[in-house]
Amino acid sequence: MQLRLVTMEEGKEPTINSIRITNQSRGSPMRLLGFMLLFIGIGVSFSIINMFKIRYLGIQNIVPGAHTLIQSCFHEPRSLQDWIKPPLTYMHTLDDSELLWRASYVPQIKEYPFKRSPKIAFMFLTRGPLPLSPLWERFFKGNEEFYTIYVHTTPSYRANFSTSSVFYRKQIPSQVVEWGMMSMCDAERRLIANALLDISNEWFVLLSEACIPLQNFRTVYRYISRSKFSFMGAFDEPGPYGRGRYDDKMLPEVHIDQWRKGSQWFEANRKLAVDIIKDNTYYHKFERFCKPDCYVDEHYFPTMLTIQSPHLLANRTLTYVDWSRGGAHPATFGKDDITKEFIKKIQQGGI
Ligand SMILES: *[C@@H]1O[C@H](CO)[C@@H](O)[C@H](O)[C@H]1NC(C)=O
Ligand SMILES: *[C@@H]1O[C@H](CO)[C@@H](O)[C@H](O)[C@H]1NC(C)=O
């Protein structure tokens, strides 16, 4: 097992710090497959029963003898709760354009006519396994009212969490992701869009399977909920790895002095989350003109949001990645590096 550091921010303030870990160990594929089939099997039979109930049982039970849909509607008026409750399952058959369209619904009246406890959506962009899940389980425990979880994986991967786990059935319909390509941003937009379907989600945090929290939940929640800024890394870097990646074919939408770079890991509020998923202008420019050696996941959101809403950005991320060793990947730490003192130093912003 290798540990890769992804930590802390510039001093002073509490941050969600994290450590990246690459875990080589795998469970037995056959057992995993067995579990997966059971899992899907249950899901399918549930939805068939549901369809059946709605189509037939519902109507017949409510209005015996009179089989019209209109009468059944009158019979069971819908409450507001019916409209605002989150989807029962994360599984759906929407393709990306359907999903993004649906997720872009925004209420035009700002006050909620119901008690809404705003939540943080923790969105994990992963290859599959979550080797650090035990730490997250402890982090989330007791805070059920204040968070939701979404996990994007390799499409074929089926997580094997027990029903008591916070990660149980938190996988969203996923697609293949290639490092440094637009499919990475697509996956991030897919995570955001799925999370937007739940009206109680107010803040959206992108994490990887290699992240761990270094502050407790209350601290993280308080910090994020009280900030008037969203924590999107965005800086103007001269030189080959910053402005050097800009292509003036992006004009007129993106000018070189609007070009930004930032860590892939971000926190965005609901407004910015909607802005990200509804974007149809910058998307095509970045898709065409930001390909390796331009890493689109480091430039697209920071640049677009800097152009649209600079006053809402903190311009720094809450997830620290240690790039101090140079190269295309952040520093990797062996397990011997991880000591109590080391973690403390990170928490206090001393590294
Ligand atoms: C899946 O989970 C069950 C119960 O939690 C466990 O017994 C089994 O070993 C797991 N399988 C894999 C492949 O991890
Ligand atoms: C972030 O940068 C933008 C310009 O890129 C600026 O307008 C904004 O004030 C900055 N945010 C903070 C918190 O300094």
Image (cartoon, grey):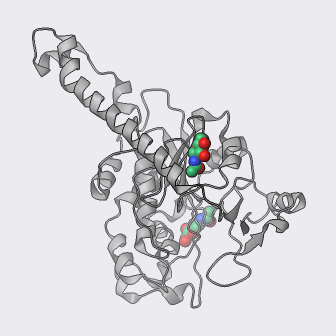
With 27 as the anchor, is 78 left or right in this view?
A: left
Residue 30 x, y percent position in the rendering: 50, 53
Quadrant of the drawing holding the N terminus: bottom right
Single out the residue that lies furthest toward the right.
341
Single out the residue that lies furthest toward the front.
30
- The reply to whether residue 166 is visible in this rendering is no
With 243 as the anchor, is 255 left or right in this view?
A: left
Q: Quadrant of residue 338?
A: bottom right
**What residue is drawn where x is 9% and y is 11%?**
66
Residue 259 x, y percent position in the rendering: 49, 79
Q: Quadrant of residue 76?
A: top left
Near-viewer residue (330 or 234): 330
**What residue is drawn where x is 18% and y is 18%?**
59
Near-viewer residue (49 or 188): 49
Quadrant of the drawing holding the C terminus: bottom right
With 134 as the anchor, is 55 left or right in this view?
A: left
Near-viewer residue (76 or 129): 129
Residue 294 x, y percent position in the rendering: 48, 83
**What residue is drawn where x is 65% and y is 56%?**
131
With 39 as the anchor, is 235 left or right in this view?
A: right
Residue 238 x, y percent position in the rendering: 59, 87
Q: Is residue 305 above or below residue 195?
A: below
